[in-house]
Structures are given as C-alpha cells and as structure tokens.
Image: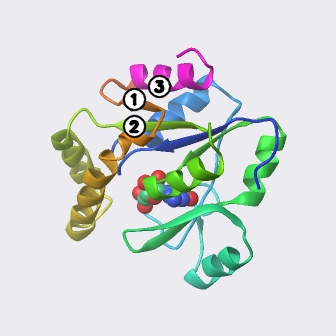
Amino acid sequence: MINGNGKLVLYSGSSGVGKGTILEKLRELDGNVWVSVSNTTRAPRVGEVDGQHYHFISREAFEKLIAEDGYLEYAEYCGNYYGTPLQALNEKLAEGRTVFLEIEVEGALQVMKKCPGVISIFIVPPSFEELEKRLRSRGTEDGETIEKRLEKAKEEIGCRGRYTYNVINDDLDTAVQEVYDIIHGNI
Ligand code: 5GP
C-alpha cells in the first residue's frame, strides 16, 4: 500500500523521448523531487551505475520480490522485468517528497487503477521521425533493440490519452517548465 504526505507522479514516454534529461533539469529547479530507483533484469548500459540508475538484479531475485508483494507495479518490457519497489517509495512519500515514477505505460496503468487521481504525465516527441532519429543517434542499443523499442514507442504513444497531462518535448526548457507547473498545481 501507498502512504505518506508526498505527491506521487507517474511519468512516461517512449524510449529516446528525453524523459531523463527533463527530469535532471527539473531536479535542479525543485530539490523536493525524488525519482524512484526501479529494479530491472536488463543488463546495465555503459555508464549506468547500480543503485543509482537502477538496481540491476537477476530474474530470480525479481520474482522473489513479486512473491513477497514488494512492488507497487511491475511489467515486462522488451524481454526484461522492470518494477517499482514499494519500500523506498513509501519512505520518501512519508518524508513529504514529490516522488516520480519513470515507468512504461503498462505499469503506469496498473498504478492509475490502484491510486485514482494520481498525477500522470506523458512526454510526447515532436514527431515519430524525430524520435527515431534521437534513438538511433543515442548509440546505446543495437539495431534489433532499436527496432523493438520503436515498435513499442508507436504502441505507447497511442496510450497518451490515458494520462492527465501530455507534454511535448520540442524545446527542453519549455518542457521542464511545464512539468514544474504541473506538479506545483499551476496548470
Ligand atoms: P530502459 O531500458 O530504457 O531504461 O527502460 C525501458 C522502459 O522501462 C522505459 O519506458 C522506462 O521508463 C520503463 N521503466 C523503468 N523502470 C520501470 C519500472 O519500475 N516499472 C515499469 N513498469 N517500467 C519501468
């Protein structure tokens, strides 16, 4: 169960849309924002740090925590598990922090059901062509993975209407300001 006085924010958008960059800037503007660190079974990318970007764990360890009801939500995305551990989330909400869950659509829909009225934000690319360009130029995934992620992106963009807010990431500073205004109730 979820408890505490902090705000919970669902934050989604397809791979390569620039969600992480927006969040980095938002955290500079608002020190109360805390981004939940998910568990995943995917391998770390170059530069990713265990415990900071994700907790990188085995499938066995992931499934053990499922059995213990240790997740707010979890989903399988492109062949790997991703999930939000409940314990740290509740600790931060109890401290009154604004907690961002940067998660894919299936997991976000699970949370919307469990927590009606939760703030939800979907980051939209200026166009699908632009998204494809960004994902390819990032250079962190091989060709097959990029194709899978583009397919998934198409599917996910189709779900953007399920979120309370859509923010277009065309100009970075404008997008950051919009997200800031949403969580501060200015929009
Ligand atoms: P990536 O492999 O690019 O880091 O993440 C793939 C997708 O999984 C992204 O859309 C990311 O937001 C999502 N994701 C990350 N953590 C979680 C989580 O805890 N739960 C769910 N459902 N999705 C997550």
At a point 77% along the width and 42% down the height, the residue shown is: 93
The residue under the point 46% across, 38% down is: 163
- Give how far apart the Cα atoms at labels 3 and 1 are: 9 Å
Residue lying at 58% horizontally and 80% vertically, measured from the top left: 58
Which residue in the structure is indicated by mark 3? 176
- Per the image, the residue denoted by label 2 is 123
Counting the numbered discs, the total is 3
Q: Which residue type does callout 3 highlight?
A: Val
Kindly indicate the quadrant of the structure image that contains residue 182. top right
Q: Closer to the N terminus: mark 2 or mark 3? A: 2
Marks 2,1: beta carbons within 8 A: yes
Q: CA distance from mark 2 to mark 3?
A: 11 Å
Residue 81 pos. (x, y %): 50, 71
At label 2, which amino acid type do we have? Answer: Ile
Residue interval drawn in magenta: 173-187
**In the rendered image, the vertical position of residue 46 relative to residue 185, given as above or below:** below
- Residue 167, disc: 1
Q: Nearer the viewer, mark 3 or mark 1?
A: 1
